[in-house]
Amino acid sequence: MSPSSEIAVVLPAALHARPAGEVVRAAAAFRATIEVRHGERAAPARSALKLMSLGAPAGATVTVHASGEDAAAAAESVAETLRAAT
C-alpha cells in the first residue's frame, strides 16, 4: 500500500482561476496523485478547470488528499498554496 496524506484547509479566497493555477503549479512538482475535495466533490490538483468546478467559496473547508511516494510533501505543498491563495 502506498503512503497517503490528508490535510484540511480553510480557504482565505474562493478557488477561482488564479489560486487554481497556483495549485496546479505546486502539484506539478510531485509524483503523488493529489486531489482537492469540497463536500462530496473531488478534483485532481493538476486540473485548474476541475478545481474551479468545485465551487469552493472563501471560508470553505477543503481537504487535500495525496497518495504515492511523496504524498506528505505533496499534500503539504498544495495545502500551503491554498492557504496563501488570494
Image: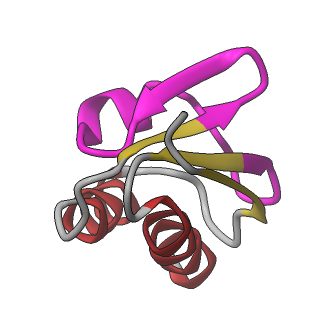
- Magenta stretch holds residue 60: yes
- Residue at the spot 47% in from the left edge and 75% down from the top edge: 73
Where residue 5 appears, x then y in whole percent?
65, 55
Q: Is residue 56 above or below residue 79?
A: above
Q: Is residue 79 above or below residue 53?
A: below
Where residue 78 appears, x then y in whole percent?
47, 67
State the residue lying farthest toward the front: 1
Q: Quadrant of residue 72?
A: bottom right
- Residue at the spot 20% in from the left edge and 67% down from the top edge: 25
Looking at the image, residue 50 sits to the left or right of residue 77; the answer is: left
- Residue at the spot 64% in from the left edge and 34% down from the top edge: 37
- Magenta stretch holds residue 86: no
| Camera-nearest residue between 82 and 59 | 82
| Camera-nearest residue between 23 and 27 | 27
Looking at the image, residue 56 sits to the left or right of residue 23; the answer is: right
Q: Is residue 8 above or below residue 54?
A: below
- Is residue 86 among what the camera can see? no
Looking at the image, residue 19 sits to the left or right of residue 60; the answer is: left
Where residue 71 appears, x then y in whole percent?
48, 59
- Residue at the spot 19% in from the left edge and 70% down from the top edge: 29
Q: Which residues are magenta?
A: 37-62
